[in-house]
Image (cartoon, helix red, strand yellow):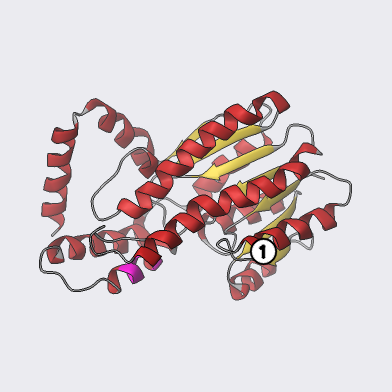
Amino acid sequence: MSAVLVTGAGSGIGAATALRLDRLGMRVFAAVHDTHDGEILAKGASASLSVHQYDATDQASVRDLVGAVDTALGTEGLTAVVNVAGAGVAGPLELLAIDDLRHQLDVDVVGPVAVTQLALPLLRRAEGGRVVFVGAAGSLVSMQLAGAYHASKYAVEAISDAWRQELAAEGISVCLVEPGPVATPLWSKALQTLDRLPASDRYADRVAAVRESLHKASKNGESPHKVAEQIEHAVTAARPKSRYPVGAAAHVVPRIRRLLPDRLFDRAAQRIAAARS
């Protein structure tokens, strides 16, 4: 039986992925931050799915997670590790609390590297192991008032590229899934960071516009199940792709960005922000 470790499985893309792979008959190790989310996930899954609580920002917790997977597998290998866990931090970089920036990078960048490092010996026990990172279309385009979020996704892009090259000789595939806006709880969490910002007349209109955009994204984004479908392909395909853009925005926006000079793109972004405010 194929075995997969999925982080961020408590909600959104992670939960949709864990349940999808579980229904395919895989043995799923679902890593969640909130135990209540894990209880809900388990109710909709088969008995072969196991839930593991962990903190992506705590190396000891990550070590315990992968250790539990290793113990459960015995001599068997891990087919894939799917790094979905992510955070959403929004706000002007000038006003952003450094702890919020640190949390964004810890969850989205350091956490997946820590999990993958420890999981690699398990992947090597399986033939053709897979590492899947969930980035975003935002890994190629940066917009104002979301600098921390985009910085983390740029980093995931670089890490995925580097690790793909480093592990190719061993037959371990590294894939990057790049969805556009997805209807997940991540955006409601990003709203909480806006609530913590100090008052500023300089940014008030733009913060209000971003707040409205986040509300819309949480309701009108792509379905997490569409992203989970692409993750399934990355995990199961004989020849997985290196990149999986998901949704119209993920296909179109990065291409437009590459064609536009920086100043022209910046003016367009300013106009979009002004129209929202």
Q: Is residue 126 left or right of residue 171?
A: right
Q: Secondary structure at mark 1?
A: helix
Quadrant in the picture for the N terminus: top right
Q: Is residue 208 left or right of residue 63?
A: left
Give the labeled residue for mark 1: 60
Q: Please tell me whether residue 207 is drawn above or below residue 146 in the rendered image.
A: below
The residue lying at 50 percent from left, 35 percent from top is: 244
Residue 34 x %, y %: 58, 72
Amino acid of disc 1: Ala
Q: Quadrant of residue 124?
A: top right
Compare residues 233 and 186 and report the one nearer the observer.
Answer: 186
Residue 245 x %, y %: 45, 36
Mark 1, Cα crowd under 10 Å, few <14 / some 14-19 / many 20+, is few
Total tally of numbered discs in the picture = 1
The stretch in magenta equals 189-193
Q: Is residue 189 left or right of residue 213?
A: right
The residue lying at 74 percent from left, 60 percent from top is: 49
Compare residues 141 and 236 and report the one nearer the observer.
Answer: 141
The residue lying at 52 percent from left, 54 percent from top is: 13
Residue 105 x %, y %: 45, 55
Q: Quadrant of residue 138?
A: top left
The residue lying at 44 percent from left, 64 percent from top is: 185
